[in-house]
Amino acid sequence: MRLLLAAVCLAALAVTPVAAVAQAKANADNNSLPTLGDSAREDLSPVLERKLGEEIMRDIRRDHDFLDDDGILEYLNNFGGALVAAYPGARGETGADFYFFAVRDPMLNAFALPGGFIAVHSALLLAAQNESELASVMAHEIGHVTQRHIARGIGQQKQDALMPLAAMILAALASKAGPDAAIGVFMGGQGLAIQRQLNFSREAEREADRVGFQIMGAAGFDASGMVAFFQRLQAATRVYSDLTPPWLMSHPLTSERIADIQARIREMPYRQRIDGLEFHLVRARARVLQDPSTQGVAEARTAFDSQMKLQSRQQQAAAQYGLALLSLKQNELAKAADWLARARATMKPTTGAVFSTGQSASDGAEMFASMALDIRLAPGQPAAQAPQTLKEAEQAHQQFPLSRGITRQYARAMIASGLLDQASVFLREQVRLYREEPKLYELLAQTYAAQGKLTLQHIALAESYVLSGAVPAAVDQLGIARKAPDASFYDLALIDARERELQTRVRDEKKEKKER
């Protein structure tokens, strides 16, 4: 699926803006970022670029391979956000609002979508040996967004080409075909434009490398991590690379990219960076979640057993944390709590040490607290534990107020304790602050259902469906809400207004699909 997506995204680059390529080449020997000029802005406006990215993301979120895991999502967005914040201009001239996520995929890869959406494959998370290696990949993808490579690649095409492009990419995401199908999509309809497309793509990759290198340096990462990961990528794809002529590759030869980065590293002072524990904990989560099959669970357990024999306390704690998650997934709650206690004990002597970069290695406290709450809130726990669970959830929320996962766990703890009025007030405040979070509306609907407020329950469910991209289902929920016996005059007015708005949106989407 990811191969097919990459191929179709490249199809967007069929018409190359010559001025943009010349500009990129002119900057090849220095560290300045190319000025995009008017071409990209005219061909794909920032608003339409973001709209395209959001349309693709709605489909990705519904895909089984989307890793909808609070621990991984929060880590990636905090990590990626720190990279963006460290480098002035990383958001580009569009002021891109970045969102980082992970997908299940056995290939070492990552990709950037229009509008600032960046994906990391689960295999890449496991292959990265340290945070500098992960930063090298994410900074490279940030570089693609910063330089608006998709917008520039569309060239002189009109803006109304945006929707057919979205349809092609969504079709690719829906397909489970293999690499041969990806090549077919890539070749279909491109004909004489292929060589120009590939040339631009190679130049875009080199440009993203240079931008990523600057971002890594500004964020205090060891730039040699980029070389180390490229070498690992080269080894993983050696057979493919050896059989493919350089002029037919969409990316430059890895050896060329390694040589370019090595030359730049020689001009920089050496920087040492010690990884935070959260990096290893997130890799443990990815190992558990990437393959839920019986064989996958067995392989994860074997990997964790081997990892616990390593000298590093971080590695040992991460393995114990991974075994806790495995036990939780199998509803072995006592084992899960025991493994989590061992992980915490392994890291107990550690304090946040500050290094020469001015950054501290994390102690994993937030992820440990979240895992403890997951265990306490799991089905099968005795109701007598609810007061203690609520107390721990409240303490965790006070300690980590920005954690979206812990915020929702706190709400779940209130619901489990029967504090429905308190939970509904808290969740209404949260949905006002975080309007784009469907899980909050789901919890609010659950709270209203427990209170017997049927109208409000279905209104909340409708908003959750809207945010998940299921607009027709949202309209259905509003219809149910209208027929509820407790619907007030105010509720009916709100339902009517929202229903008209969503029905217009459904008609527009159907019209767009017909035009495609």
Image (spheres, rainbow, N blue to C red):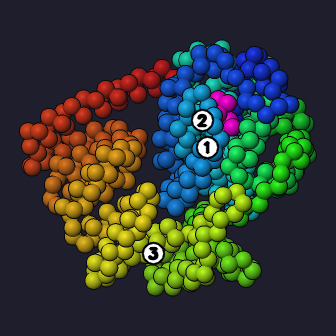
Task: For mark 2, give the secondary structure.
Answer: loop
Callouts 1 and 2 close, C-beta under 8 Å:
yes
Tell me if I can see residue 107 in this picture: no
Name the residue that disc number 3 marks. 372
- When the figure is inspected, residue 425 is found, relative to residue 481, above or below; the finding is below
Query: Real-space Cα distance between discs 1 and 2?
Result: 7 Å
In the picture, which quadrant includes the N terminus?
A: top right
Q: Residue at x 35, y 41 (%)?
A: 466
Q: Viewer-proximal residue, 338 or 503? A: 338
Q: Position of residue 376 (x, y in %)?
A: 39, 76
The magenta stretch spans residue 147:
yes
What residue is shown with label 1? Answer: 84
Q: Which residue is mark 2?
A: 91
Would residue 127 be found to the left or right of residue 66 on screen? right
Q: Which numbered disc flags the more N-terminal residue, 3 or 1?
A: 1
Decide: marks 3, 2 in contact (CB < 8 A)? no
Left or right for 139, reference 378: right
Give the residue type that dot 3 points to: Ala
Q: Is residue 248 visible?
A: yes
